[in-house]
Amino acid sequence: MGGDKLPRGGCGLAAKFGRWRGGPGLVLRWGGGLSAGQVRISSVAKKNKKNQDLPEGMSRRQAKLAARAAERAKLQRDARPYAGFAMESDLIALQEFVPSARVKVEVEGIDFPVSLVTVLPGAVAAMRRAAEDGGEGFVALQTQRPGDNPNRDLAYALNWIKTAEPGAALEVGVADGNEPELTDLLDPKADEEIVVEQDFNWWLTEEHQDNPQVAATLRRANDSVLPSEKVRADIKGAAWWIDPGERAHIRWVRPEDENELLNALARVHAAGELNLGEGSKFAGVFRTHGVMVPVWDLDNSWEPQAWQKGLEALDKKIAEALANDSGRFTPEEQKAKQTIVSREVTIR
């Protein structure tokens, strides 16, 4: 890795698309969605009235302090926001570095199609297509103004789309503490098929793509998409390949405890086996959403699926290292751990 910045991927798209406010062409598509006013989201505690009953044994001041503490607790950062979801690794990938992808999900209480997507026009949080275009709902994982808890933001946006009119858009979808639990809206056991795209043509129906203004905006968006693909392999977590140009990368979102995985990676690295085979080089790791994501630099002349066997072989070595963790390191393993830590980046 040297002095290179650890490759992340599609995160910058939300900020970029937030500057592209779409123009009238995209308004045609979403029925006014991009021109919707900013949804102001706040969590202002209501003042207790003088005649309101207080909790037993509390003064009015104590009750206010307790209420404020409860509000703060609602908005505290969740250490591992998607823990318990079968799609945890993929949700993290879609949120942090996959440029263009979508997955249809079943949402409790919604009888029209809904898809979770990487990013939407204008980097808004959610949208519904116009009725004449089918009224499908879209909820983005990469947004221009994310909150501290992506799982709660996602629950907020999914709850909003329940009652959203066709053509409406949720510009800002930061949780306010009143949203339902994400597990009340999505089945944690569901592991749906992700559709990986190489452009954003799915934003619009074909008839709207014929509009010159829409076509120009869509072309700019498509120019920002880097080739990306999920590598199909029998492994823990999810491995995503992306090619920025000079070299490709694989980012492998792993579900294990971060520190336990770090120890296992150190042992494998000390044995000279922390690679995916010929044409690969371990680049470093980043931590995000309570998990660790090892990264490899790759020869980009190889097809993404060519790394399947290397991933599966390394997965077995990591599993063995996890199972045989004695808590003690040889000097070589300790040095390998320090090397990995020196190549570590924390995203959030």
Image (spheres, grey):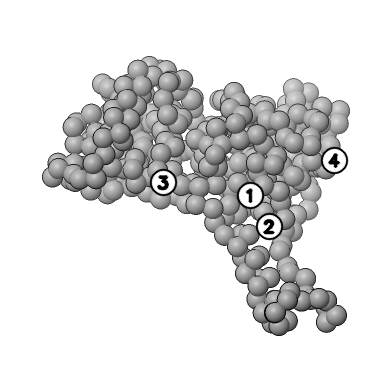
Q: Is residue 289 left or right of residue 75?
A: left
Q: Disc 1 on helix, strand or loop?
A: helix
Q: Earlier in the sequence, mark 4 or mark 3?
A: 4
Q: CA distance from mark 4 to mark 1?
A: 22 Å
Q: Earlier in the sequence, mark 4 or mark 1?
A: 1
Q: CA distance from mark 4 to mark 3?
A: 38 Å
Q: Is residue 306 above or below residue 318?
A: above
Expressed as whole percent of the image width and height from the top left, the position of residue 81 reads 55, 47
Q: Nearer the viewer, residue 100 or 154?
A: 154
Q: Earlier in the sequence, mark 2 or mark 1?
A: 1
Amino acid carrying mark 3 in the image: Arg
Crowding at label 3, few (<14), some or many (≥20) Cα neighbours within 10 Å?
some
Q: Earlier in the sequence, mark 2 or mark 4?
A: 4
Q: Is residue 300 left or right of residue 103?
A: left
Residue positioned 31% across, 21% down in the render: 313
Residue positioned 42% across, 36% down in the render: 254
Amino acid carrying mark 1 in the image: Arg
Q: Disc 2 on helix, strand or loop?
A: loop
Q: Which residue does the numbered mark 4 point to in the structure image?
A: 165
Give the total number of marks visible in the rendering.
4
Q: Give the quarter of the figure containing the N terminus.
A: top left
Q: Which residue does the numbered mark 1 point to in the structure image?
A: 152
Tell me whether circle 2 and circle 1 mark residues in contact (CB < 8 Å).
yes
Q: Quadrant of residue 65?
A: bottom right
Crowding at label 2, few (<14), some or many (≥20) Cα neighbours within 10 Å?
some
Q: Which residue does the numbered mark 3 point to in the structure image?
A: 287
Tell me whether circle 4 and circle 1 mark residues in contact (CB < 8 Å).
no
